[in-house]
Amino acid sequence: MRSSTRSRPIPSTTWRGRRLGNLYKTARKDIPKAVGAYEHAVEGIKKDKVVWENLGMAYYRNNQVEQALKALITASTLDPNDAEIRANLGTVRRQKGDLPGAITDLEAAVKLKPDDAQYANNLGVAYRFAKRDDDAIKVFPEGDRAVARRRRPSTSTSRWCIAGRAPRTPT
């Protein structure tokens, strides 16, 4: 078997590790097993940005933020112009409390893929947490600008901002 980005064959055990990681992550929702499968895959393919990104996000979903950050930084060094990797790296940095780093990565993701509303929304939320309201208002999609103007958004408002839609009012 060959990878679409490589010209030499991928060892079968490594390929199985990558496929098993995807299976555990999506179908079975077994994140610890996905982490193990991706770790095995990374041993065989050290230059595959997708495996490193998947490993990083599996770590993140398994609440291993430090390891997630290291794996996503590795993926980002393999391809610094991948908007999805930069956005995921920004999300993990924000979770860790590194707002300047998160903003830098999310700004890069928005610059690489300006039409992606989710990246812009996540950048707006990061600006809001950093108390940069004017910057947040500029990047939020039109419908979310009213939410960004509030001085102290509630927890539910922050969650709705991240989801990219306005909070519902109870009926």
Image: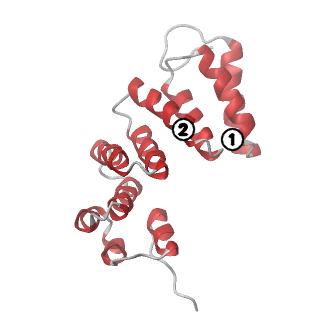
Query: Seen from this angle, which residue lies furthest bottom?
Result: 171
How far apart are labels 2 and 1 at the CA level?
A: 19 Å
Image height check: is 143 above or below 69?
A: below
86 lies left or right of 22: left
Q: Residue at x 38, y 53 (%)?
A: 119
Under mark 1, the amino acid is: Lys
Residue 21 lies in quadrant: top right
Tag 1 residue:
25
Under mark 2, the amino acid is: Glu
Q: Residue at x 31, y 45 (%)?
A: 104
Q: Residue at x 44, y 51 (%)?
A: 97
Residue 58 lies in quadrant: top right
SS at mark 2 in the image: helix
Q: Earlier in the sequence, mark 2 or mark 1?
A: 1
Q: Residue at x 57, y 40 (%)?
A: 57
Q: Position of residue 22 (x, y in %)?
A: 67, 35
Front residue of 82 and 46: 46
Q: Nearer the viewer, mark 2 or mark 1?
A: 2
Q: Which mark is residue 66?
A: 2
